[in-house]
Amino acid sequence: MHKIDDYISKIIYKVLSDNKAKDIIKINLEKKSSIADFMIICSGTSNRHVISLSNYLIETLKKENLNTLNVEGKRNGDWVLVDAGDVIIHLFRSEVREYYGLEKMWAEEEINSYIK
């Protein structure tokens, strides 16, 4: 993992944890995909919470001059994907997260139950 990745992951973790995201995990993708170096997945308690988490995250990334490349799913708030280049962040309502099962798809031993 690159030094910038550690910096970005700490910023993302702080924003998500400060705003009460649930079950934050980080998955290392370096050897699995060229789309990003890692993926962060978390849950919000409702559609409004997921949308709020994405707003806080996007605002913070912009303040840190880390431009988001793409944001999807923000309209209804079941899930939101924030593509920040080397980092992809998935924000889900718990039921939707369970349905998609991204942790099982992308990770085995690489899951970190929290980021520090």
Image: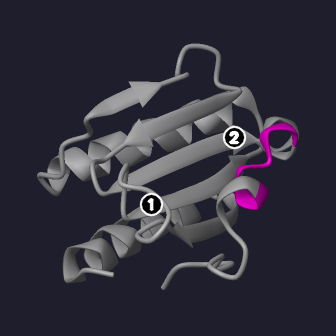
Can residue 38 be found in the magenta stretch?
A: no
Q: Secondary structure at mark 2?
A: strand
Toward which corner of the image does residue 55 lie, by quadrant? top left
Residue 39 position, x and y percent, is 50, 59
Can residue 102 be found in the magenta stretch?
A: yes
Q: Name the amino acid, label 2.
A: Phe
Q: CA distance from mark 2 to mark 1?
A: 15 Å
Toward which corner of the image does residue 37 lie, by quadrant? bottom left
Compared with 87, 14 (above or below) is below
Compared with 70, 9 (above or below) is below
Q: Nearer the viewer, residue 99 or 29?
A: 29
The reply, left or right, for residue 51 in relation to residue 63 is right
Q: Nearer the viewer, residue 116 or 88?
A: 88
Crowd tier of the residue under label 1, counting other residues whose Cα lies within 10 Å: few below 14, some 14–19, many 20 or above: many
The reply, left or right, for residue 43 in relation to residue 32 is right
Residue 88 position, x and y percent, is 43, 50
- Sequence-wise, the earlier of marks 2 and 1 is 1
The residue singled out by tag 1 in the image is 15
In this picture, which residue range is highlighted in magenta?
Answer: 99-104
> Viewer-nearest of labels 2 and 1?
2
The reply, left or right, for residue 2 in relation to residue 93 is left
Q: Secondary structure at mark 1?
A: helix
Residue 107 position, x and y percent, is 67, 67
* Image quarter hosting the N terminus: bottom left
Toward which corner of the image does residue 99 lie, by quadrant? top right
Residue that appears at 47% across and 24% down? 72
Compared with 3, 39 (above or below) is above
Residue 19 position, x and y percent, is 56, 56
Residue that appears at 44% across and 57% down? 33
The label on residue 92 is: 2
Residue that appears at 17% across and 51% down? 63
